Image: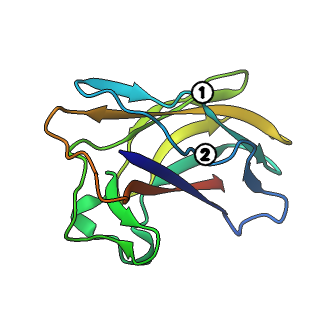
Amino acid sequence: MGLVISLLFSASPVAAAIAIEVVTRPIEGWAFIPGTTNENPTPLTLAVTTEGSPWTVSVKDALENGKMPSSAGRLLEYNTVTGWVNTGSVIAGNMTVVGESSAGVTGTTATLGSIDQTIETGSKQVTGKQMAITLRQPITYTDPYLTNGNTYRVVITFTVVQQ
């Protein structure tokens, strides 16, 4: 079963000096074990810069490039030539995104879906503040195993907003 997780980032237009970037690259080749909640082997690292506080980082599955709405927050079969296989296999459980807590930052856990869910809340201005983001994916024994060369994919959109 192949897997690709793509990440998109956006920042609020409120301030010119607000930014979010990925420090580590997207996850590929994550091996799943059925019957467990699998955690990405290497957490993603985000770096956030703000002009002030408070600020939040949220996540959602924006259903990029025609992904079917009923698969929001879940891994859907993907073909690298034709794109989403909207009549294909989908993993039953939604992915969970976990934000790290550290000095001045409160991390929370969010179930990925089509609506923004907060995973980080900052109480002070930051410059390049790095935060580990953990992804968790439950896999059941009944989730389809892909044998046709396709992969499972989800695009996670991270957004930082300064209030």
Residue 77: give its label.
none
> Percent from the top left, x then y, of residue 94?
29, 44
Q: Which amino acid does label 1 sit on?
A: Glu
Nearest to the observer: residue 102 or residue 53: 102
Q: Which residue is drawn at 61% across and 23% down?
A: 101
Vertical placement of 139 versus 5: above or below? Answer: above
Query: How far is mark 2 from mark 1, CA to CA?
Result: 13 Å
Residue located beneath label 1 in the image: 100
Q: Which of marks 2 and 1 is nearer the N terminus?
A: 2
Q: Is mark 2 on a helix, strand or loop?
A: strand
Residue 56: give its label.
2
> Percent from the top left, x then y, of residue 117?
43, 48
> Percent from the top left, x then y, of residue 61?
42, 58
Q: Residue at x 79, y 36 (%)?
A: 129
**Snapshot quadrant of residue 123:** top right
Q: What element carries label 1?
A: loop
Nearest to the observer: residue 19 or residue 5: 5
Vertical placement of 97 versus 148: above or below? Answer: above
- Examine the rendering and report whether any part of residue 124 can be seen: no
